[in-house]
Amino acid sequence: MTDDNDFEALLKELEKTEQALAARPKVGDRVQGTIIEIGEEHAFVDIGGKAEATMELTNLRDADGQINKVVGDTIEAAVTGVDPDSGTLVLGSRHGRHAHGTDQLEAAFQAGTPVEGQITGTTKGGLEVQIAGQRAFCPASQADLRFIEDLSILVGERSSFRITKLEGGRRLNLVVSRRAVLEEEQAQRAAATRAKLEPGAVLPGTVVGLQEFGAFVDLGGVEGMIHISELALGRVRHPEEVLSIGQEIEVAVLRIEQTKNPKRPERIALSIRALAKNPWSDAGQRYRSGTRVRGRIERLEPFGAFVEIEPGLTGLAHVSELGAGRRVDHPKDVVQVGQEVDAVIVQVDSERRRIGLSLASDRIAEAESNTPQASTAQPTSSTRSSSKHHAEESAEDAGVGTLGELLKAQLGQDEA
């Protein structure tokens, strides 16, 4: 009778073991667990059900190489393999797992889990990658999210790859994609970013592309564009004047327009200019009549010269204010675009955004003797000033200082 009871207990224990094995996570499953120990190379994780798993510390290091988790922290990761010696589950997160042998490569291929490899060189049409002692090929189109003209810049890097083709034989035919892993990470970041996207939001971003018309910025898995007119208060001739690839910046969201393109479901208009203080808000206090300033000639017209006093702030020196006691037929006779000049404020109309200037030497001398040099504002070499629209409006309302009816008449002829 005792033997029967022992046999029945053994069957029940065996049944429990089989149930536990059946419920055990498989390669590719995502699990949640608690870190119970951090060793020199691995962290040990309790994933419940009396099961433990290990994770390489590379998965827990930040960009500076520091471990950003402690014992007791909860983590979520994918099961990337099973240790062949102990049977312990192996976890990974944003990095691929270290595969050992063709069996684990096959398991990773079937489950679609990433593996870690080292880029060892370039070859015709792509990259050569070493994974688990095997040579793999990564096509150029699968090397990154964006096209990389010189693939040699990636040589020597360790990265995660998804196996897209695995064929046996004396020598494995192994094709991998780095882009597939990057796209998955990008999608995860994009979900978090879209939750914060709305007009008026101020977000950090990284410059990822520069074109003549503007700059592309990665907001965290989602890209937006800053039109060249929104890069600065002043005039910018090319985005390279103020930004560089990889630069970290802060931007304001102007508009979000939905598209029918699944790869880029929205067009996001961004601005740096919107975050800058409007220089016209206190221009009247900072630049009073008689103040001597220094600026740069921005544009010449038959009726006068436009002078940038500071980014976003442009004044007009009428042709009659360009000489001292002598007639000037055209501004190009005395000044040229790009030239730095001394000038005197004749009048400021902040509401209409008008500044009348004089470059006449006698006015400058008088201002220097009668009043202190109140403004030290200098234009920057990388940002240039206000739009043609504002400049033409300055000419149209030329009732500032000595700009007068002659300028209005000239504008009327131009418009006609």
Image (cartoon, helix red, strand yellow):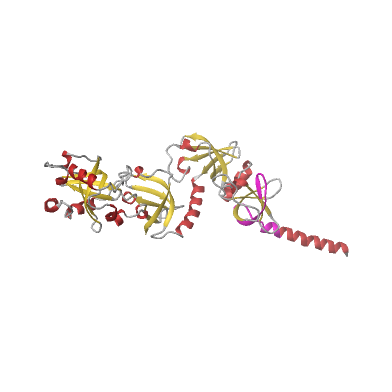
Where does the N terminus fall, quadrant-wise? bottom right
Q: Nearer the viewer, residue 57 or 278?
A: 278
Tag count = 0
Q: Is residue 329 above or below residue 400?
A: above
- Pinpoint residue 87: horizontal percent, then vertical percent: 70, 49
- Pinpoint residue 252: horizontal percent, then vertical percent: 39, 55
On the image, which quarter does residue 393 sit in?
bottom left
Query: Viewed as shown, does residue 107 lie left or right of 406?
Result: right
- Pinpoint residue 385: horizontal percent, then vertical percent: 28, 48
- Whether residue 270 is visible, yes or no, is no
Query: Viewed as shown, does residue 208 lie left or right of 9?
Result: left
- Pinpoint residue 177: horizontal percent, then vertical percent: 51, 44
Q: Nearer the viewer, residue 238 or 160?
A: 238
Identify the residue at horizontal 76%, vertical 59% (top origin): 14
Q: Nearer the viewer, residue 115 or 221?
A: 221
On the image, which quarter does residue 319 sit in?
top left
Q: Nearer the viewer, residue 272 or 45?
A: 272
Identify the residue at horizontal 72%, vertical 58% (top origin): 18
Q: Is residue 70 above or below residue 130?
A: below
Outermost residue, right side: 1
Query: Viewed as shown, does residue 411 lie left or right of 62?
Result: left
Q: Is residue 8 magenta?
A: no
On the image, which quarter does residue 100 sit in?
top right
Outermost residue, front side: 370
Q: Is residue 26 magenta?
A: yes
- Whether residue 71 is visible, yes or no, is yes
* Span of residues in magenta: 19-43
